[in-house]
Amino acid sequence: MTRGGEQIIRRVDSRVVYRNRWMTVREDRVERPDGSPGIFGVVDKPDFALVIPAEDGGFHMVEEYRYPIGRRTWNFPQGSFPDGVRGEPEALARAELAEETGLRAGRLERLGFLHCSHGTSGQGFDVFLATDLTPGEPAREPEEQDMRQRWVSRAEFWELVDGGRITDDSTLAAYALLMRYEGTAG
């Protein structure tokens, strides 16, 4: 089968093998462009928003224990709407920023949309730059009860990357969009 001159993989059938309130895992039987059969495991998760709260030449970041990797890491605030709730990406970005950091953005600018793990999931995320920040109290979810927040300089950001304390691909990809936006990307 082709689409626009490009050969694509065709889904023959699909079955859900696991589901919880955060994700669905399905197994798809497929037919490759050459006609041979194949299989894909796909993780369906809702898109999310990631916010870069910029202030005074640095960023407000959050740190929490990440169960799948067994350690604490730093990242930009991010999250998705709960349990099937739908809404605009900007509203989600504002909600996540306030929930995780307590900060409110006077200005929120969309920098782009990216996919975070396109080999196993269709999940993507909108990246926003938040400025003109006003402090407030966070309203974290139970899963975020160990979350910490602090401001980091741009130099410290890279120190955290070099030291393995920032390993989140979405945070690094968002930083690349920020560099492009600022005209500092090569």
Image (spheres, grey):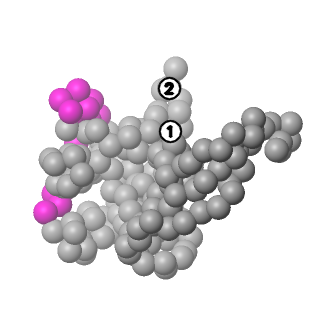
Q: Which residue is drawn at 16% across and 48% down?
A: 70
Camera-side residue of 81 and 176: 81
* Image mark for residue 177: 1
Image coords of residue 61 (percent x, y): 26, 50
The stretch drawn in magenta includes residue 74: no
Q: Going from the N terminus, do you reach mark 1 or mark 2 first?
A: 1
Instruction: Give the position of the N terminus as an image quadrant.
Output: top right
Residue lying furthest top: 186
Name of the residue lying farthest toward the front:
36
Q: Where is residue 178 in the image (x, y as percent from the top left)?
A: 47, 39
Answer with left or right where residue 73 lies relative to residue 32: left
Magenta residues span: 146-164
Q: Residues within 10 Å of mark 2 (few under 14, many from 20)?
A: few
Q: Return the residue at label 2.
A: 185
CA neighbours of label 1 inside 10 A, class few (<14), some (14 to 19), many (20+)? many
Residue 10 circle label? none
Q: Where is residue 60 in the image (x, y as percent from the top left)?
A: 27, 51
- The type of residue carrying mark 1 is Leu
Please name whichever residue, 10 or 96, is drawn nearer the observer in this view of the structure: 10
Image quadrant where residue 106 sits: bottom left
- Along the viewing direction, whichever of 41 and 74 lies nearer the viewer: 41
Which type of secondary structure does the marked residue at label 1 adopt?
Answer: helix
Residue at image location 52% in from the left, 20% down from the top: 186
Please state the horizontal and vertical placement of residue 44, each as a whole percent of the image: 50, 61
Rendered image quadrant of residue 139: bottom left
